[in-house]
Image (cartoon, grey):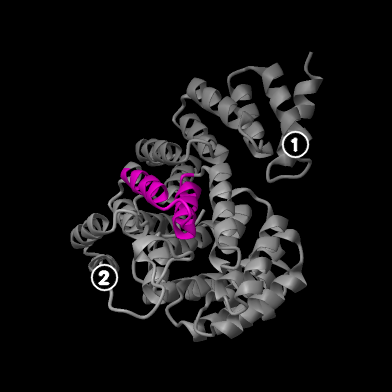
Amino acid sequence: MRYVCLLSLLLYVLLHGAPLVSAGPMGVAAPRAPSAAETAYRRGLERLQKGELREAETAFQEAVQLAPQAAEPRLGLADVAMRQGQGKQAETHLQQALAAAPQNATAHLAWGRYLTQQQRFPEAEAAFKKAITLAPQAAAPHVDLGDLYLSGLRKPQEATASYRTALQFEPAHTGAQYALGNALAATGDVAGAQAAFTESSRLAPENPLPLHALGELHAGRKEYAKAMDAFTNALKAQPKFVQAYLARGDVYNLQGQAEKALAEYNQALQTVPNFALAHIKIAALHEAHKRPEEAEKSYRAALAADPRQVIAYNNLAWMAAERKTQLGEALAWTQKAVELAPHISQFQDTLGWVHRARGELDKAETVLQKAATLEPQQAVIWYHLGLVRFERKKTKEAAAAFKQALQLKQEFSESEDARKRLAELEKKP
């Protein structure tokens, strides 16, 4: 779920001179000198844009005192609070804005965005629909409702309808065109998605995102030449758009051109040093080509760049368990991965595998039993559970685990060994 800063709403007021629905003393009905409240409010916006939060807060508070029935200064205070990590305080300011100006569409839109970030999706939907009722021809509420449907509620068809409505009112809305492409892609309408991304790129040729999305669409259909063209065009639009280098590397990797892939990933690092995801890509490539020392070096570099890179912790632990080296560090790494993402079954699987490598079979079985039942269930985890049970002389339980693995998926990386072991166990009396 992407976070949409409330500042974008406040900038609307700054640029257009009024909220989506003008209400209260902050509204501007005709050209005139700004009031003292508006002057303070605009000063708050300018400070907010510069990241001067304390000064922005002071200016917004002054505007609230001068115009207590206006929503916009309270939205400014909410934005300051969000930037300071004070979510509850932001919610209070938003509620006060709604109480001060209940017919202000901007306030309802800001409230919906806050609720979306808090994953309170039904309430967010209601807030966006209220904003639409108050400002039916404004594009922004329709776009935000579409974002909620697409990313939060996983309803791409409803998202498509919302984006198309927004474009009826603002045909040149680049973001709506781009989002429409994503929604259409999610419904399987590839041609429609391509058309939307192409139009979004035409409207904003300096924006690499629509071109990158086109590339991903082509790559997903194994149209690698077209994908490379799109990613290259994204880099022409924005030479420092490092995601395009990674995407080009991925396309090369999919075609078995590992050295070209590595060159693209390294180019991303040259463009943005200490880019953690580029280190992850490089490490994974080395790991896939049986170069564990190089992989470890790159995973460690990823963690140095971003200590919350959970994949790096997990993969370092897995490699150590496979090689039965650095098992103390491996345990710490895998425990950190599980701490950061406790509901990811693969990370629980790695924890169990590390315990097995350390000879702690009882702990391994306990962890793998939990991992195997996490949804969506993974055949390879049931296979690992079967191995540990077999090593603990639990032959019936081992057979049951191998059988469950094969029922989940007939073909996986260790399916042949699972079938062989199951056949041998079923022969025993």
Crowdedness near tag 2: few (<14), some (14–19) or many (≥20) residues, C-alpha within 10 Å: some
Crowdedness near tag 1: few (<14), some (14–19) or many (≥20) residues, C-alpha within 10 Å: some
Which residue is disc 1 drawn over?
Answer: 408
Residue at 76%, 66% (x, y): give it. Answer: 189
- Dot 2: what SS? loop
**Residue 140 in the image: x percent, y percent?**
54, 65
Residue at 39%, 76% (x, y): give it. Answer: 15
> Which stretch appears magenta?
89-118
Q: Magenta stretch containing residue 110, yes or no?
A: yes
Disc 2 residue type (three-letter): Ser
C-alpha separation, residue under disc 2 versus residue under disc 1 = 68 Å
Disc 1 residue type (three-letter): Leu
Q: Earlier in the sequence, mark 2 or mark 1?
A: 2
Q: Is residue 206 visible?
A: yes
Q: Please name which of the two marks, 2 or 1, marks the residue nearer to the observer.
A: 2
- Image label count: 2
- Dot 1: what SS? helix
Residue at 48%, 64% (x, y): give it. Answer: 21
Q: Which mark is residue 380?
A: none
Magenta segment's dominant SS is helix
Which residue is disc 2 drawn over?
Answer: 35
**52 up-or-down from 329: above or below:** below
Query: Is 338 situated left or right of 173 in this image?
Result: left
Q: Judge by depth and name the residue closer to the eye, 321 or 78.
A: 78
